[in-house]
Image: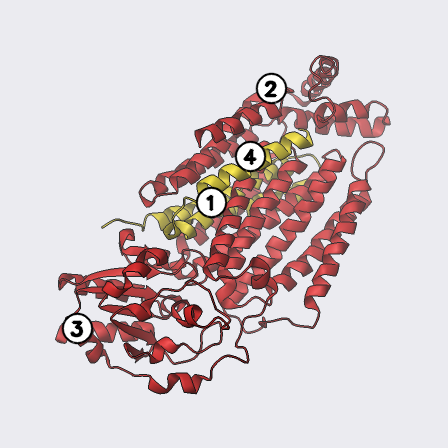
Amino acid sequence: MDLVTGLTIFALAMYVGREIITKVPPTLHTPLMSGSNAISGITLVGAVLAAGHDGLAANIVGCLAVAFATINVIGGYAVTHRMLGMFKKK
Amino acid sequence: MLNLLLILVAVCSFGQPTDHEVPTATPSTELRRDQAEHTAGAIQHDDDNADVAGDDEGGAAEQLAPADDGGLGEVVEGEAVHGSRSSSGRRLAYLIASILFIAGLKWLTHPRTAVNGNLISAAGMLLAVVATLTVGGLNWVWIIIGLVIGGAYGGYKAIKVEMTAMPEMVALFNGFGGIASVLVAGAALFYEAATVQTGVATALSGFIGSITFFGSIVAYYKLQNVKWIPNGSMFSAQQVFNGVLVVVCILLGWWLTVSYGTNGMPTGSAHAAYWLIFIVAAILGILITQPIGGADMPVVIALLNSYSGLAACATGFVISNTVLIIAGSLVGASGIILTKIMCKAMNRSLPNVIFGKMGPTSETPDADEVYKTVKSASPEEVAMLFDSAQKAIIIPGYGMAVSQCQHACRDLMNLLESRGCTVDFGVHPVAGRMPGHMNVLLAEANIPYDKLREMDEVNPEMEQYDVALVIGANDVVNPVARTDPKSPIAGMPIIDVDKARTCVVVKRSLSPGFAGIPNPLFAAENTLMMFGDGKKAMLELIAALKEG
């Protein structure tokens, strides 16, 4: 992937993010943060490739990365689900 | 909105024109196929020259030709995994995952659809991870160890955490996101071919990720009110020193970017430079976060949230992965927006929150003078006020979280509503220790979300409320923000409880809030102070209402 393509994707994704997230009401700001915690666990994709790569050094560093990213993914989605379940209408 | 999505979809699919499909096969055939495809790719590149220059997959293979034999086998084997991990099927899965993340966030814009939004986003994550796991030739042992440890701890935290401890948990998770990015970029140095682009991106991953991790750890402990982290700068010229650290990181980043061998792979000095960046940025992260005080925590958490996304984004550039770039940008954008909202709700700029000082000035009036006319009331007196009220509003602050009286608030609401008095909740954007903190606590206590009203919504109607009950809030209801342009909180939007017919403030003492200034609201003619712990005061009030 060349740099300009990457930057194009980056700029457009930032713009899409901005457009959507400004519409999230303040009531949901905490679930938004824990939910985006979970999304930032996307590094799990890179972590899996690192942990599964040949070479012990990459294995160990990658394994740690998988553990941290998985905490974010599992913990983030689960706690967001738990929290959102509490928001009820009268 | 839809158009934006379409543009993004188009760019994603256009972004990776080369196709290195390698089905799962024995390592040797995989290697041969891959080599063959690289050759074919090199020829084809003459036709589709759109991406020849920047395509590091084809490019790296071409670079390999003159390299010595020893390195060649090893690197080509790396390339085999590299090639297969960007198969078109997998890239399509990443694209769908990205769309699911965006759709999930979109559904998070209303409490009714938010639960499903979160599930959609989780489905996107599952898809991205499963697609990655189908890459051939992966060493599963290490992956599974990491998944089991992380999954167990993450699941445990998610089930066990108290809602009052959400700010700490989000702070901690911001940090974990940052350190995961640091480790992925660090591991990639072992097998990712070095170009200026990957070098800069690697340095950025280490820098942002390390600041995020160590800054978040400091924030985590500060939120627990530990005594050993001092508020305010620890030594003079702390900010200047921080500036020096940034310059050191930039120099180290330059060193990393130029440190690659003749085979195009990072050398030992690249590794050294990377982990030095990690250490220097760690000190920087600690020194930036340490001076920031309690009530500014919502800004810090939102900012670190943004950083954790940007670190993932930088890592996406390191390993040329679009889903990391997109998901990281979404989180980055989310954090930046929340940071802006928080700053606006305090009428302060971001540099002022991070580098500035908050406190009384020489112009600040004397507390004893201001509090001369304070009236204290017993629960029975306050109950009598509520007896004749038609419309009441409760303004929660951090004190409600500390005394955990959200359930008592719900009981009070139910009792008053059963007597025909409508009850609303007015929530200030920076009340508490993180964005939306009060809303989650009140939702936990089963208070319907349509009862939780925003500052801008309730302020115009404030005159119609018979009673405004302030629980553990101070600066966010201080009318000085409106009246005294010289005050440290001048211009900060507040909830105008002083305009309600009567105002009752539940507070332990007259001690000042975060801004360190006295609050004339407490001494106003239509204000009654109800001194005591929030929960205890609420329970006494409910008892008094039932008796009367």
Residue at 24%, 71% (x, y): give it.
Answer: B501
- Describe residue B544's horizontal placement relative to residue B508 as left or right: left
Q: Cα distance, mark 4 to mark 2?
A: 32 Å
Disc nearest the viewer among 4 and 2: 4
Q: Colour of chain A?
A: yellow
The N terminus of chain B - image quarter: top left
In depth, the one of B339 and B261 nearer the eye is B339
Q: Which chain is red?
A: B
In depth, the one of B307 and A24 nearer the eye is A24
Location of residue B198 in the rendering, given as x and y in whole percent from the top left corner:
71, 37
Q: Which residue is mark 1?
A: A74
Location of residue B199 in the rendering, given as x and y in whole percent from the top left corner:
74, 40
Callout 2: residue from which chain? B
Q: Which residue is mark 2?
A: B23
- Describe residue B304's horizontal placement relative to residue B246 as left or right: left
Same chain under badges 3 and 2? The reply is: yes
Callout 1: residue from which chain? A
Callout 3: residue from which chain? B
Q: Amino acid at mark 2?
A: Pro
Q: Reply above or below: B13 against B190.
A: above
**Earlier along the polypeptide chain: callout 3 or callout 2?**
2
